[in-house]
Image (cartoon, grey):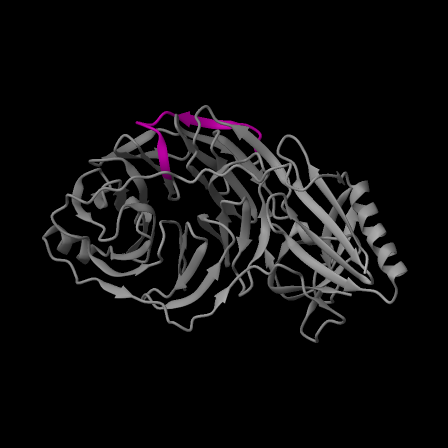
């Protein structure tokens, strides 16, 4: 049985594509493997009635890719994207007691990723594990991603995990899928998302903005490197780096302001009218969103890894490199410094009178941050923390290595189609009851001209596009 393999790559300069496409013909079977260079990629397999038809189908696929700029290459000569794993140290806390921790969940590896919404608390660690828990600590779901989780971000009801491999995965359904792919020359440090627009801060101090169709919009280079902060609202993008915080207009047309901070920015938080920057010079600084003016400084005892606030900045919280968490009044008065009970807080988020932290020892920690608990902790009274465990039978969801093919759409399935528009491959809804002119947020690496796919659900998003919910299957 003869076998032939054609391997192609498309690697563009200046932050463009960095992907491969491999076609193997074995008798009547055609296997296609594709993805980002340096990754295992995804695979599709089709069987044809004769060897001649299989070869013709393979030739057609190869021709389509060559016309798009792919060229023959030797696998392994181009390397995968650069990855910087944040190097942090964590010393034991010198605080007299532990903060008012309600419960903690240990994930098994240092964790940067956190997102807290009305229903769930999410944590992602350096092993690529993402867990979703109820606010009472019950473990509800486990996802296993191919690489370490840099951060977790949410946009309305959608939750995304940005990983070290440059892929941003949509975790809104049981089967994660790659929603965005970051250019290979962008060494991701932090992400934020707003109405489908992804904002990427990187090692070199760059800011890259990508739309909901995974297409480049604009980029800027700030004056400082190592940008560990990016926050966005409808007015601006706030970019924190070694030399302070720079605010850019939301459309990328210009810089609004730049404010030097006391030390390099390592974390950022935003409220309606202010942004907060935690720095390596032991402070959190509050800046006015409209002007960048320094409004308040909150002094800690060591390097600040993370920060968050109660609504309106009524309380300001900070986590340092010595496994302590601080609580300040809005004016900068320190109310207390207490131990986290689980390593240094690398990231944190506040919601509904609770402070959630993820730490260097891989814990997700839930702290009572109500007014009564803050006062009690100041007086030396804290609850006994509860350690929660994951159920042994909890299923693990992983991104599919292949796109399953189906012969027809189920009654409840929604059909979408890839169409060529102005040199770009768009996805529109074919099924009735949807706006046919709206684009669908759809993984770029599986789009093929003329191909139709079936999805379980589509939801309209702000900005006039649809988001996919559920498994993606290709119609054949």
Q: Residue furthest front?
A: 1
- Compared across the picture, whether 423 is left or right of 199 comes to right
Front-most of 325 and 274?
A: 325
Q: Residue furthest left?
A: 379
Residue 275 in view of the camera: no
The percent position of residue 252, horizontal first and vertical second, equals 56, 32
Task: Locate residue 324: give its quadrant.
Answer: top left
- Compared across the picture, whether 262 is left or right of 232 comes to left
Q: Residue furthest bottom?
A: 411
The percent position of residue 135, horizontal first and vertical second, equals 34, 64
The percent position of residue 63, horizontal first and vertical second, equals 83, 46
The percent position of residue 336, horizontal first and vertical second, equals 16, 45
Instruction: Classify 220 as above or below 159.
Output: above
Q: Give the range drawn in magenta.
A: 252-267
Instruction: Classify 51 as above or below 270.
Output: below
- Compared across the picture, whether 155 is left or right of 306 comes to right
- Point out the image quarter for the C terminus: bottom right
Residue at 11 percent across and 48 percent down: it is: 96
Task: Locate residue 258: give its quadrant.
Answer: top left
Residue 189 in view of the camera: yes
- Point out the image quarter for the N terminus: bottom right
Instruction: Classify 260 as above or below 390.
Output: above
Was residue 309 drawn as part of the magenta stretch in this picture?
Answer: no
- Compared across the picture, whether 412 is left or right of 284 comes to right
Query: Across the whole image, how many numbered discs are drawn on residues?
Result: 0
Task: Locate residue 37: give its quadrant.
Answer: top right
Was residue 254 drawn as part of the magenta stretch in this picture?
Answer: yes
Front-most of 180 and 247?
A: 180
Residue at 37 percent across and 44 percent down: it is: 271
């Amino acid at each position: 049985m003869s076998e032939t393999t054609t391997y192609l790559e498309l690697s563009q300069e200046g932050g463009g594509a960095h992907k491969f496409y491999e076609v193997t013909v074995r008798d009547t079977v055609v296997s296609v493997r594709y993805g980002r260079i340096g990754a295992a990629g995804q695979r599709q397999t089709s069987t044809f009635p004769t060897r001649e038809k299989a070869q013709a189908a393979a030739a057609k696929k190869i021709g389509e890719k060559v016309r798009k700029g792919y060229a023959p290459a030797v696998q392994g000569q181009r390397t995968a994207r650069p990855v910087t794993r944040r190097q942090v140290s964590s010393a034991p806390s010198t605080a007299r007691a532990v903060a008012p921790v309600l419960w903690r969940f240990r994930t098994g590896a240092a964790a940067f990723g956190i997102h807290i919404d009305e229903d769930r608390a999410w944590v992602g660690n350096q092993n690529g594990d993402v867990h979703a828990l109820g606010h009472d600590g019950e473990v509800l779901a486990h996802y296993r991603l191919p690489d370490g989780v840099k951060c977790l971000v949410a946009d309305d009801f959608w939750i995304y995990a940005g990983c070290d491999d440059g892929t941003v995965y949509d975790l809104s359904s049981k089967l994660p899928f790659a929603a965005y792919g970051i250019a290979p020359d962008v060494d991701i440090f932090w992400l934020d998302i707003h109405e489908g627009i992804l904002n990427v801060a990187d090692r070199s101090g760059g800011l890259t903005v990508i739309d909901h169709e995974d297409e480049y919009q604009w980029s800027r280079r700030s004056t400082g490197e190592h940008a560990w902060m990016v926050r966005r609202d409808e007015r601006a993008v706030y970019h924190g780096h070694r030399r302070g915080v720079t605010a850019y207009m939301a459309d990328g047309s210009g810089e609004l302001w730049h404010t030097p901070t006391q030390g390099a920015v390592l974390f950022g938080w935003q409220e309606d009218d202010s942004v907060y920057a935690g720095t390596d010079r032991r402070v959190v600084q509050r800046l006015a969103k409209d002007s960048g003016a320094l409004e308040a400084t909150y002094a800690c005892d060591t390097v600040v890894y993370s920060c968050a606030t109660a609504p309106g900045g009524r309380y300001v919280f900070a986590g340092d490199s010595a496994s302590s968490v601080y609580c300040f009044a809005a004016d900068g008065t320190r109310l207390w410094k207490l131990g986290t009970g689980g390593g240094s807080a690398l990231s944190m988020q506040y919601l509904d009178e609770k402070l959630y932290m993820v730490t260097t020892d891989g814990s997700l920690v839930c702290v009572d941050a109500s007014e009564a608990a803050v006062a009690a902790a100041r007086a030396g009274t804290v609850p006994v923390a509860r350690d929660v465990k994951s159920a042994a039978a909890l299923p693990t969801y992983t991104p599919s290595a292949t796109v399953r093919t189906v012969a027809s759409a189920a009654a409840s399935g929604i059909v979408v189609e890839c169409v060529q528009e102005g040199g770009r491959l768009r996805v529109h809804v074919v099924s009735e009851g949807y706006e046919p002119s709206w684009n669908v947020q759809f993984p770029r690496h599986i789009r093929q001209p003329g191909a139709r796919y079936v999805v379980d659900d589509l939801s309209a998003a702000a900005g006039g596009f649809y988001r996919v919910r559920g498994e993606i299957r290709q119609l054949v």
